[in-house]
Amino acid sequence: MKQTVNTERAPEAIGPYSQAIKANGFLFISGQLPADKNSGNIVDGGIEAQTQRSLENIKAILVAAGSSFDNVVKTTVYLKDMNDFAAMNGVYAAYFTQQCPARACVQVARLPKDAMVEIEVIAILAE
């Protein structure tokens, strides 16, 4: 059994997908761009600001699903430029401070809306 999760506190999906899906005790959050929830535009300010916006969008979805960053077990970070890894990692580290999740980080040729970063997560749901 699966359940769709949507919140107005994060940008709407820009295609035929859900912000997140609850299934079998897990929460699967679609890749979150660093988009402003109201305008849908990518935020200005470089990789740090974009990483923070992506993670804040994820936070809004986690909260809407009854979860939190403490319950995240896996992340995937997509970077436009691997040279931004250290700067992205500095912001990321502020959100994951204990029992950090497993993670993959890859450089990609291009992201939607020419974003510099996109982050997806898998979390466990609180019992």
Image (spheres, rainbow, N blue to C red):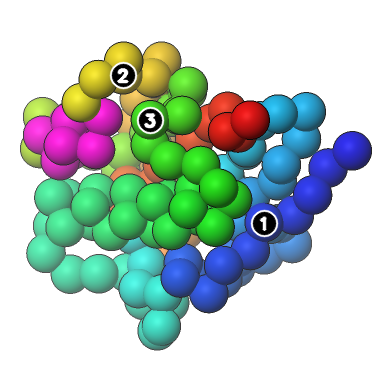
- Helix, strand or loop at label 2? It is loop
Viewer-closest of 24 and 84: 24
Residue annotated with mark 3: 70
Give the overall secondary structure of the magenta segment.
helix
Q: Which residue is mark 2?
A: 100
Residue 103 sits above or below residue 44 on the image: above
Kind of residue at badge 1: Val
Upstream in sequence: badge 2 or badge 3: 3
Total marks in image = 3
Q: Name the quadrant containing residue 70.
A: top left
Distance, label 1 to label 3, CA atoms, is: 19 Å
| Residue 9 placement (x, y as % from top left) | 45, 70
Q: Report whether 122 appears left or right of 105.
A: right
Asked if 121 appears above or below 115 in the picture, the reply is above
Residue at the image position 48 percent from the left and 22 percent from the top: 73
The quadrant in which residue 78 appears is: top left
**3D distance between C-alphas at marks 2 and 3:** 8 Å
Q: Where is residue 39? Give x, y as percent.
A: 40, 84
**Residue located farthest toward the bottom when viewing the structure as drawn:** 39
* Mark 1 / mark 2, whichever is N-terminal: 1
- Say what secondary structure mark 3 lies in: helix
Q: Quadrant of the N terminus?
A: top right
Q: Is residue 43 magenta?
A: no
Is the residue marked by circle 3 packed among few (<14), some (14-19), or many (20+) residues within 10 Å? some
Q: Which residue is mark 1?
A: 5
Residue 113 located left or right of residue 6: left
